[in-house]
Image (cartoon, rainbow, N blue to C red):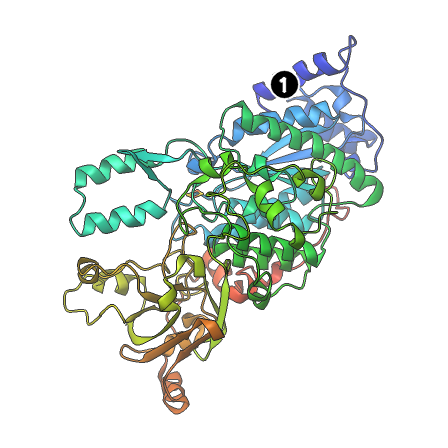
Amino acid sequence: MSDNGHDAERRLRDRSAGPEGAAAPAEPGPFRSAEWFAREGKYGFIPRSWMKSQGFSPELFDGRPVIGICNTWSELTSCNRHLRDLAEHVKRGVLMAGGFPLEFPVMSLGEPLMRPTTMMFRNLVAMDVEETIRANPIDGVVLLAGCDKTTPALLMGAASCDIPTILVSGGPMLNGRFRGRELGSGTDVFRLDEEYRTGLLSKQELGDAEAAMSRSAGSCMTMGTARPWPPAGRGDGHRAADERLDPGRRQPARGAGRTERGANRRAGEAGDHDLADPQPGRVRERGQGQRAIGGSTNAVVHLLALAGRLGVEFSLEDWDALGRDVPTLVDLKPSGRFLMEEFFEAGGLPVVMQRISEKLRLEAPAVEGGTIGERIANAVSYDDDVIRPRDRPLTEQGGIMVLKGNLAPNGAIIKPSAATPRLMQHRGKAVVFSDADDFRARLDDPDLEVDADSILVLQNVGPRGYPGMPEIGSMALPKKLLEQGVTDMVRISDARMSGTAYGTVLLHVAPEAAIGGPLALVRTGDMIRIDAANRRLDLEVSEAELAARRVAWVPPAPAHDRGYGKLFIDHVTQADQGVDFDFLAGKSGTPPSKVSF
Ligand code: FES
């Protein structure tokens, strides 16, 4: 615990425990931390002694629950750089409720810096979280996350531990502003880059915009990959969308600390866990929630992986089938016009939840007490242009479509709200790039044979191929077409795309090219048909020809022959399975472990 944490502990003890200055008495509970801290002799002496060396008071070892605060703060993860401050407020909440908070770091995943892609390390962080919790005297955990992959990684790891868990989102950053124009994270980078490449923006102007886009800590303020998680959690959605990075953000963090201690008490008594309650309805509700907010395509692989950890039957097909009648209500970039500040001021997630309330289990308990129904009952919309009423949606059909066919036997996905409607029914000639390097090298080649009806195909950028399934599926358009005024084309790959990106982009093709999926057999000039209405994606090449190409196909050399990279390539599952490791599905709980001395 930092010095600040000790200050908090002292202040809270003084404030809430009366003149004796003793912390609120703990309720007895069968907590696993007692295996460390309540033992007689050397087995209790050693853990207590070393912890007391940090200044922790003796009463903290009186049988109260230990609440881990799992922190992804890092200067390498700019979006999460405020989480140490939030952690102090969670600690206060835990102390106020009579728990013993212990903060611990795990590997952090900063989207803008990490290479080859943060997705390659999501499972590693999940392992870090899972094993850190299991190996230590932790009875419940508060997860502090924000930047894209930090949230699913922490949820997946905690899910496999089966202990009471609450997620505190770091919230979005402030809206970007540049010359009277709002700039949305990511989304406007793609636009600015196109303007720069076609000479509409100077280098100086691009540099000025760069300095104006990211104005604070917090995650991307568009409806990017970081955004769908607050509604995926079970709690106070309005606070999850809270723009404020001032004390307004800290109060809910403190509330989470108090609640976690309470949830832990209930868990000890009645087995009422949050993540540990694997009801299929919860995962499905989360999928429907994505539709209403126009959530990122990345939520598909993360929720599939989380369902796998929880043992919930939830498939790629469910993504398409669930909530086909749930429209996109939130008018946020990249599908719409606004950013998270406007969303929060319009009333935030409680309004969205209220407007799709027939799809939710309103009797489900909310994290902060009461039921979900009670928490959203009085939600008020302050701007129906930002959060649309059901009879005036942004798009009638939101969410994710799953297409299958001989080009994607196990599925490919598309986000209709980010696509051009006329391109959802399309037939065009493939222009194939064999990998990301080939794409970058030839995209702007004046001799590239491509027109607005062509379909760009990118191979070998899937889970094993890249490896790590990077967010490069929303391939930039060829410069010569941009100069002709082309703004969208059909693009197909086994990659993901940023939640901030847009376009008629078919992603997550499974099986991927690097393991011999049909995507590997496509050649420039082949005709491809997209029939989104009938959920079809087909390569119009005869079976005989495809069989001949399959025989001639040579798999790409693996990118790694040792270390974590090899572990990843050897064990990662395909996109339709959640891109988790095959040996990590399910959960192991926190069984009693052996002492080491
Ligand atoms: Fe961190 Fe977008 S870069 S959430």
Q: Which residue is at the far front?
A: 391
Q: Which picture quadrant has residue 478?
A: bottom left
Residue at position x 50%, y 68% from top? 402
Residue 451 percent across, percent down from the top left: 22, 70
Q: Which picture quadrant has residue 112?
A: top left
Residue 415 can be seen, yes or no: no
Residue 234 percent across, percent down from the top left: 65, 44
Residue at position x 32%, y 45% from top? 188
Residue 101 percent across, percent down from the top left: 67, 29
Residue 505 can be seen, yes or no: yes
Q: Quadrant of ligand 1?
A: top left
Q: Which residue is mark 1?
A: 8
Residue 86 or residue 387, whichever sits in front = 387
Mark 1 Cα within 10 Å, few/some/many (few <14, many 20+)? Answer: some
* Image quadrant containing the C terminus: top right
Residue 351 percent across, percent down from the top left: 58, 42
Which element carries disc 1, helix, strand or loop? helix
Q: Which picture quadrant has residue 204?
A: top left
Relative to 97, is 420 on the left or the right?
Answer: left
Residue at position x 28%, y 38% from top? 210
Residue 28 or residue 289, whichever sits in front = 289
Q: Amino acid at mark 1?
A: Ala
